[in-house]
Image (cartoon, rainbow, N blue to C red):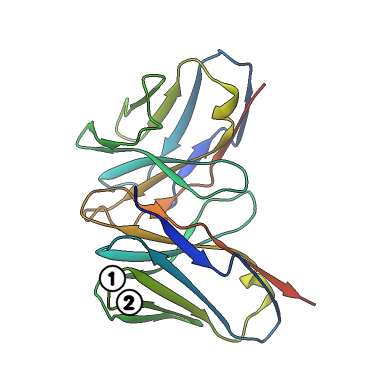
Amino acid sequence: GQQLNQSPQSMFIQEGEDVSMNCTSSSIFNTWLWYKQDPGEGPVLLIALYKAGELTSNGRLTAQFGITRKDSFLNISASIPSDVGIYFCAGHFGNEKLTFGTGTRLTIIP
Amino acid sequence: EPEVTQTPSHQVTQMGQEVILRCVPISNHLYFYWYRQILGQKVEFLVSFYNNEISEKSEIFDDQFSVERPDGSNFTLKIRSTKLEDSAMYFCASSPGTGVEQFFGPGTRLTVL
């Protein structure tokens, strides 16, 4: 089956720092999505990317759809305490399910 | 802003018992899904539902599982005879016409004893 690996697995940063994480796949996707999950809650959609090479922003978040269609990147600028959580990439290819990545846990050190 | 809602938030059951997890998708969405997340792991697809029938299911979704849309608003997941390994968070999601952008509910934590 399709595997989505995210790196890093976890990040410890200070408030105000920029964050970069990525997601790589063993196969191509037509759409990449990024979700954030807070403890005990459901994933919340942050950004959706529809075309290879596309760069899309949502406030302090910027995501890119890799040219090979096998990867995607998420950047968060000037992190704030509410950015803490687990970030999941998800790929969509023609059928209806989303394939989720392994997640990147973001922790902000006081 | 419209949201997917799920009930109950936490369900505790004995092994072998039947459970029904309930969801109210976002009104006017056309695609409905169930996913599960074992503690500390990634979110896994179970089943998708469109036009009143299952459109895709994963290998996890075996004969113990069933889904139903009994009326115009509810979407349910039934597990006929729960096993210990069914303990997980179960998320319902819905999507408008494209089936790509999926919006998730808050989840039901199922604990099987």
Q: Position of residue A33 (x, y in %)?
A: 38, 64
Tags 2 and 1 touching, CB below 8 Å:
yes
Residue sitting at x 56%, y 21%:
B83
* Label ID, residue A66: 2
Which chain is indicated by disc 2?
Answer: A
Residue at image point 58% right, 50% down: A41
* Above or below, B42 relative to B68: below
Q: Amino acid at mark 1?
A: Arg
Q: State left or right for residue B20 relative to residue A51.
A: right
How far across and how far down the image is residue A94, in percent?
Answer: 20, 54
Q: Residue furthest front?
A: A26
- Residue B61 is left or right of residue A17, and the answer is left
- Classify residue A103 by image quadrant: bottom right
- Res B26 seen here: no
User: Residue A91 or A40: which is nearer the viewer?
Assistant: A91
- Give the Cα separation between the discs numbered 2 and 1: 5 Å
Q: Write down the residue under mark 1.
A: A69
Type of amino acid at the residue the image marks with label 2: Gly
Question: Residue B34 location, x and y as percent?
Answer: 40, 39
Residue B58, position in %: x, y? 34, 36
Task: Pick whichever, A68 or B26, lies toward us.
Answer: A68
